[in-house]
Image: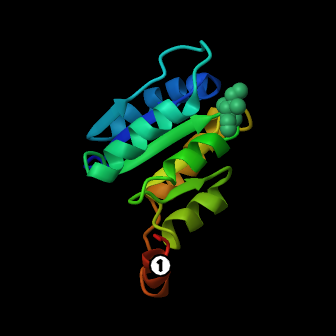
Amino acid sequence: MKNIRIAIGSDHAGFELKTQIKEWLEPQVEVLKDLGTNSEESVDYPDFAHAVAGEVEKGKYDLGILICGTGIGVDMTANKHQGIRAALCWNKEISKMAKSHNNANVICLPGRFIIIEQAKEILDTFFNTEFEAGRHKRRIDKISC
Ligand code: RB5
């Protein structure tokens, strides 16, 4: 996992989980860039979701991690970017499929509904799963309109 570059972002509702994820993930990856927010002061989740999704779309990072209260707002926003396949993951079974079938390049987490142990399980599973390609590649190639 050392050679992966990750951008991470959240709104105020995801700030605490983002801080905990960073502490755990930073020593394990090549780059972990935090694009905000930087406190629990109320902010607008699209500002941070666009920042992370935009950088992943440009190829500056291999993966984005986005957190808001439900994960829904950041997921909707990130998926507006043509090059982004953002997956809302709330357990390890979903994150396994998000990689093996959808080859997601942004993982969205619900900060108000999971704790750090669940987030670690979700992310570890994603990192240790391969994209199956084949028919799944054909399907993801049909997503953009
Ligand atoms: C903020 O209160 C909340 O709406 C936001 O974190 C997120 O859940 C939106 O989808």
Mark 1 C-beta to ligand 1 under 8 Å: no
Relative to residue 76, is residue 30 drawn left or right? Answer: left
Residue type, label 1: Lys
Q: Is residue 69 visible?
A: no
Give residue 143's position: percent from left, percent from top: 50, 72
Can you say whether 120 is above or below 12 in the image? below
> Which residue is identified by label 1?
142
Can you say whether 44 is above or below 113 in the image? above
Which residue appears at 52% of the width and 40% of the height? 66
Residue at the far bottom in the pictured view: 135
Give residue 112's position: percent from left, percent from top: 72, 32
Residue at the far front in the pictured view: 145
Q: Nearer the viewer, residue 74 or 1?
A: 74
Which residue appears at 62% of the width and 52% of the height? 88
**Total residue callouts:** 1
**Quadrant in which ligand 1 is drawn:** top right
Which residue appears at 47% of the width and 71% of the height? 145
What coloring was used for the rendering?
A: rainbow
Q: In which quarter of the view is residue 69 placed?
A: top right
Q: Give SS at disc 1.
A: loop
Residue at the far right in the pictured view: 113
Can you say whether 17 is above or below 53 in the image? above
Relative to residue 9, is residue 93 drawn left or right? Answer: right
Give residue 21's position: percent from left, percent from top: 50, 32
Which residue appears at 62% of the width and 16% of the height? 42
Dot 1 alpha-carbon crowd within 10 angstroms: few under 14, some 14 to 19, many 20 or more = few
Relative to residue 7, is residue 124 drawn left or right? Answer: right
Q: Is residue 16 visible?
A: yes
